[in-house]
Image (cartoon, rainbow, N blue to C red):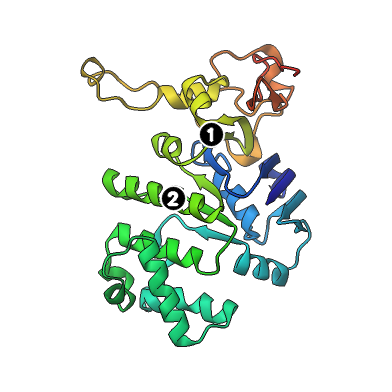
Amino acid sequence: MIEAENISVAFGEAEALRRVSLSLRPGERLGLVGESGSGKSMLGLALMGMLPEAAQMTGRLAIDGHDLSRATDNEWRDMRARKVAMIFQEPMMALNPLRRVGDTVMEPLRLHLGLSKSDARRRALELFEETGIQEPEEKLRQYPHELSGGQRQRVLIALALACDPGILIADEPTTALDAHVALRITDLLTRLARDRGMVLVFISHDLAAVARTVETVAVMYGGEIVEKGPVAQVLSDPRHPYTKGLLHARPTITGGELRKRLPMIPGNVPALADLPHGCRFSGRCSVELPQCAEVRPALLGIGGLRACACHHVPEVVE
C-alpha cells in the first residue's frame, strides 16, 4: 500500500528528512516516535503530499501502486480524496468554527463521492456512530466549540474516514486529551484499522499510547529512522542509545522513584541547518565513538524484523 524509498525533504541546505524508507501493507499499524523536531510530522505530510511549498522532496513514493514522486497537485488531491487521509493534531484548529460539524463531514461525501444531501447526512450519521459519538443526530447540528475535546477528535476521525481511505495517518491524535479519553481514542483507531484493513501511521510522543496501538515502531531522530522493529521488542529491549534515552526519561509512579529527578538526554535536537555530518545523534550520545561524528551509520538488520542505525550495534546477516 505504501512504498517509500530513500525519501529526503530539504529546505535549501537544511534537511528535514534524510533517506527514509518504509513499506506498509493493508492492515499494518506503524508508530513513529521521537522528540519534537525529529521529522515525524514532516514524514506524515510527505505521505499526504502536503509538504510546504519551499520543501524539495527526492526519492520514490508510491501509494497503492501509483508512483507519486512527481505527482501534480490535482493528482495528489484525487489521492487524498480516496486513498489516504490524515487526523491532525489539534481538532479545534482543524475544524471550521463557523460550520456545524455535520456539514464538515458531509462535504467530502458530496464533493468526492457525489452523494445527495440526504445520503451524505445518512452516511455522516453512520460515521458518527462508528466512531462512538454519543447522540449523533444532535452532534451533527453542533459547532466545534459545543463539543468536548474527545468528541472533536472523534469528529476528525469520522471526517478522515468519510471517503473510505486505505491509509490513515494520525498525527498526535491524543494531544491535550486526558488519559481516559486518550485511551478510548487509541482503542478506537486500533479497532478501525483492524476492521477496515487500513494502514495506520500513528505519530506520537506517548510511548504508552504507541505500545497499545501499533504493531511496529520506528524511532526517528534528526529526520532519520534510527531504530525500527516490533513494538514490544523495541520498547522492552532498545538497541539505539537514543531509544534507550527516550525510555529512561519516562516518568514512573512507583514509591521510591517519586522524588528522583527524571533522567535526561543531554543537549537539544540540533537545528536542521546544523546537523552533524555523521550520526545525527552525535554530540548527545553517551557512548559515542570517534567515527560517529563523521560516518553516517546505515539502518541495518539486527535480527528478526529489527533494524538499527548505530556503530555500536553490529549487523546480523540472516
Q: Is residue 310 above or below residue 138?
A: above
Which secondary structure, mark 2?
Answer: helix
Report the mark closest to the observer, 2 or 1: 2
Mark nearer the N terminus (2 vs 1): 2
Tag of residue 161: none
Residue marked by disc 2: 191
- Badge 2 vs badge 1, beta-carbon distance below 8 Å: no
- Asked if residue 258 can be seen in this view, the reply is yes
Q: Are there few (<14), some (14-19), or many (20+) residues within 10 Å of tag 1? A: some
133 sits left or right of 170 in the view = left
Closest to the observer, 280 or 216: 216
State the image coordinates of residue 53 (x, y, percent, origin top left): 67, 62
Q: Are there few (<14), some (14-19), or many (20+) residues within 10 Å of tag 2? A: some
Q: Is residue 308 above or below residue 199?
A: above
Closest to the observer, 119 or 91: 119
Q: Amino acid at mark 2?
A: Arg
27 sits left or right of 22 in the view = left
State the image coordinates of residue 185 (x, y, percent, origin top left): 37, 51
State the image coordinates of residue 162 (x, y, percent, origin top left): 50, 69
Residue marked by disc 1: 269
Q: Is residue 9 above or below residue 131?
A: above
